[in-house]
Image (cartoon, rainbow, N blue to C red):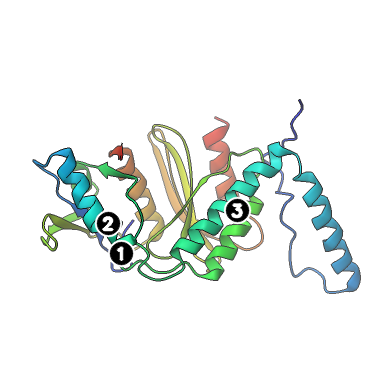
Amino acid sequence: MPSPHGETSVFCISDLSDNEIWNIGDREVAQKRGLPLLGRADILAFHILNKNLKLMPDNNPPRHVNILDWPSEKSEQKLIAIELAENSQLHLK
Amino acid sequence: MSMAIQCIDCPSFYAIPSGVGFSDDFKNLVKNIKKQIQEICEPLTIGRPLEEAFKSLIEIYKECSEGNWDGYNALPITVNAFEEARNVINLLPTSIPMPEILSEPDGSIGFEWRKGQKLIFVISVEGKYRINYAGIFGSNKIHGSEYFGEMLPSVVIENLRRLFYR
């Protein structure tokens, strides 16, 4: 789901090893929340673009990308979110 | 062992409508009903899932009641959102499995039911008398928003039935 600013933070993991991907999660998510990382969801960029969302890399931090152009209606956001979840691959740590 | 199951068409017996009486008689009636509800919930088949759902809700509220709980400026879950989520749990038909409960970045509390691939129904509340919902049922998709007062909107009950009784 998008943040209150209408963005969803993701990281580009192309060409990264499994360890490198988990390191990003530990550094950029777990440490920020002060909670251990339990898992991650990987999704192809195609599925995000297929929902008329936009991918905007800002590399801040490195490899960071924002998903933008979520619809304003909350229920429509929820539908897109569950469709993206259906097309993603869950990995448990 | 026999198990008490509430029919999905019947309103939940956990929730007592508020604001329908003010007299001492009404207060006594509410007190007696609450006592009877407590006795109904004693069997593990009914009481345990409810207890676990409330426990999960309280944990989520504790973790997410301050802003920026996700490290990405998420809004806090307000006490109104928590109370509304508690009402949702109380109003769910007991014949439906308890959902997974989660927090959302806009401060809403979400409820997710998943029966398998492409069989999902989700709702959320944020303490503003509205339920937002979305669902995937095979090739069919739905989403919308309904007023939420003292009863769960019929569209929520119908889609839970669709998910679990097709």
Q: Secondary structure at mark 1?
A: loop
Tell which of A90 and A44 is nearer to you. Answer: A90
Q: Quadrant of residue A92?
A: top left
Q: Are marks 1 and 2 in contact (CB under 8 Å)?
A: yes
Q: What is the chain identity of the residue bearing mark 3?
A: B
Compared across the picture, whether B144 is left or right of B153 comes to left
Tell which of B68 and B99 is nearer to you. Answer: B68
Task: Check disc 1 and give the amino acid type.
Answer: Gly
Q: Residue at 12% across / 54% down in the picture?
A: A63
Which image quadrant: the C terminus of chain A?
top left
Residue lying farthest left? Answer: A15
Ranked by sequence position, the earlier of labels 3 and 1 is 3
Q: Which residue is mark 1?
A: B71
Dot label at residue A29: 2
Query: Is residue B153 at all visible to an observer of this figure?
Result: no
Query: Is residue B129 at all visible to an observer of this figure?
Result: yes
Label 3 to label 1, Cα distance in Å? 25 Å
Q: Secondary structure at mark 2?
A: helix
Residue lying farthest top? Answer: B1
Q: Which of labels 2 and 3 is toward the front? A: 2
Q: Which residue is mark 3?
A: B54
Are there few (<14), some (14-19), or many (20+) residues within 10 Å of tag 3?
some
Are there few (<14), some (14-19), or many (20+) residues within 10 Å of tag 1?
some
Say if B20 sits above or below B96 in the image.
below
Q: Position of residue B35 (x, y in %)?
A: 83, 55
Task: Check disc 2 and give the amino acid type.
Answer: Val
Q: Residue at 37% across / 34% down in the picture?
A: B139
Q: Position of residue B94 (x, y in %)?
A: 67, 42
